[in-house]
Image (cartoon, helix red, strand yellow):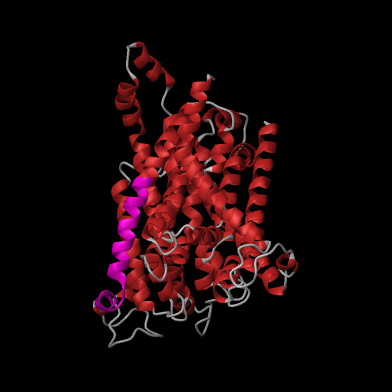
Amino acid sequence: MEQKLVPYYRIVEKRQRTLRGIMVVFFIVVQIVWIGLPMLMAVFWSLVNPDHPWSYPQVFPSHLSLAQWDYVFKFTNIIRALGTSYSIAPLATIFTFLLALPTAYVLGRRRFQGREAIKILILLPIIMPGMVTALFLSRVFSFIGLDQNFFGLVLAHSLMGMPYMLRILTTSFEAIPQDIIDAAENLGATSFVKFKEIFIPMVLPGLFAGTIFTFITSLEEFSLTFVIGTPTFETIPTILFSFLGYHFIRTNAAVVSLILMIPNIAMLFVAERFLKTEYLAAAFGKM
Amino acid sequence: MPTKNRLSTLLLLLPGAGFIFLFLAAAIFMTVLQSLGFFSLTQESRFTFDYWRNLFDRQVIDSFLFSLKVGVGSSFGTLLFSYPLALFMRKKFFGRKPLGSMLKIPLFVPALVAAFLIINLIAYHGMLNHILMALGIIKEPLRMLRDKFGWVVLFIQIWKNLPFQLLIISASLETIQTDIEDAARNLGANKLALVRYIIFPLSIPGILVAVILVFIKTFGDFAITSVAGPIYPVSISVRMYAAANMFQEWNRAAGIGVVIIVTALLFVWLYSRLAKMMQGQK
């Protein structure tokens, strides 16, 4: 008798809630293993004490020290690479933004023939496999004297970031309702006022997302830098490649990996409040 | 559109689209010409099909097939994880936001770092071996690095590309209107039928984009395969790079480059045909 007091749908609801709770816990555990464990291993490797090597069958290193960090900063070119990476990235981002703004405006606000084709054309740097672009752009660059050249690297990084900036800005311009612009025009707004009061504020979140993606693309860029820049210029990824390739030194690679990765992840979490990664989905959801 | 307007449209398009077009057209032009014997660095430049005739030897074919395998394997392998995850993430539940943020992390981890992280995990005394041994599945650590098939490469690529696919598929799932779902449910569709007949067909465009973008990225990959891939065959990009920079056979490298570009474009074309077909069906 008593059981009938609880409607059936309540029981189902409760069962579903428990099931979902179990699923969530399961997913969080998987997440910790899937994301957390690899990161933890890298942190441990970067803290290995050179006097007490970490070898099989130890699960974790027995002694920790900052000696590896010390070594990497003292005896490798990491400081210069950091300087190169972090001077190319902002320059490339600004350059990309300046070039992308007018094009994104036209692609987002005007309808003309060949618009769809151009929207695909601007994806070319992503569609073309990086190493092919790198090798043969380097041939082109060496003809015009941009090989092994800082400005050449900024240009190359801008090229790789351009699709992100253009696509995301275009989506933002497209999203502005025409009514608002019409209303402003009715009220006598000039082009300048329209830009200042409508376009800029409404495009700002997209601009922010585009900037972050371009910046990160530049920090991560490997193929073009490797072919056009080395040996004159080293960035953090090319240094990491040398530690992972010919001279495989796990501890050094761990330090450089963390140097490369931590700012990116920090950016993700700081930016999460303003930046919706959904912009990326909106910009690339349709090719 | 008035002529003046058309002119200004063109001028405004130039900085962004023109920049991309200029440099990529130059690079593609250079690739094609070099594969035909022009701009030769070591030999006399002349028009010839010799490089094309000798291009497809055992090594190049093996590398091409390997890269194709990695591309198809990574794009569909990632889908295997990203699609159920995207379905799961549609629901509102406690802890969805932090979980979503965590899931996005690999998107911001550079490819080389991702390779390093996974290498650590599966190395001879990596965590995976410890866990497998603790569970009593194996007696002795396995040597899994640089395996012949390329499982490690697939593992790294799936780890790295999962959030990207998840984002795109989630966005395409969000556009499905709840009315349709409600209607189906009213008509007595259970969960499986809902996914099978409503959600899945409607999310195919998103799936196509997610798969094609990951395919292109992984097919042309250089860095990950060269640090974690098998000794032989190397990926097609590594083969091309070696031809150019180790053996100074730039014309041969250009031939391989053309093959890579054509393959990538072929898949994009295939995608657009499929996408059009889907639209036609609706």
Is B278 rendered above or below residue A248? Answer: above
Q: Residue at x 57, y 49 (%)?
A: B25
Which quarter of the rendering shows the N terminus of chain B?
top right
Q: Name the spot of residue B159 as percent of width and height, x first.
A: 48, 61
Q: Look at the image and say whether residue B9 sits in the magenta stretch.
A: no
Magenta part mainly helix, strand or loop? helix
* Residue reaching furthest to the bottom: A51
Q: Name the spot of residue A185 as percent of width and height, x first.
A: 36, 15
In this orientation, which residue lies closer to the viewer: B31 or A60? B31
Q: Look at the image and say whether residue A89 sits in the magenta stretch.
A: yes
Which quarter of the rendering shows the C terminus of chain B?
top right
Q: Name the spot of residue B236 as percent of width and height, x first.
A: 61, 66
Specify start and end residues of the magenta stretch as a single range: A68-95
Q: Name the spot of residue B160 as percent of width and height, x first.
A: 47, 59
User: In the image, A176: left or right of B152?
Assistant: left
Q: Residue at x 55, y 52 (%)?
A: B26
Q: Is residue B139 visible?
A: yes
Is A98 rendered above or below residue B256? Answer: above
**Which image quadrant is residue A208 in?**
top left
Q: Residue at x 27, y 69 (%)?
A: A79
Q: Is residue A14 visible?
A: no
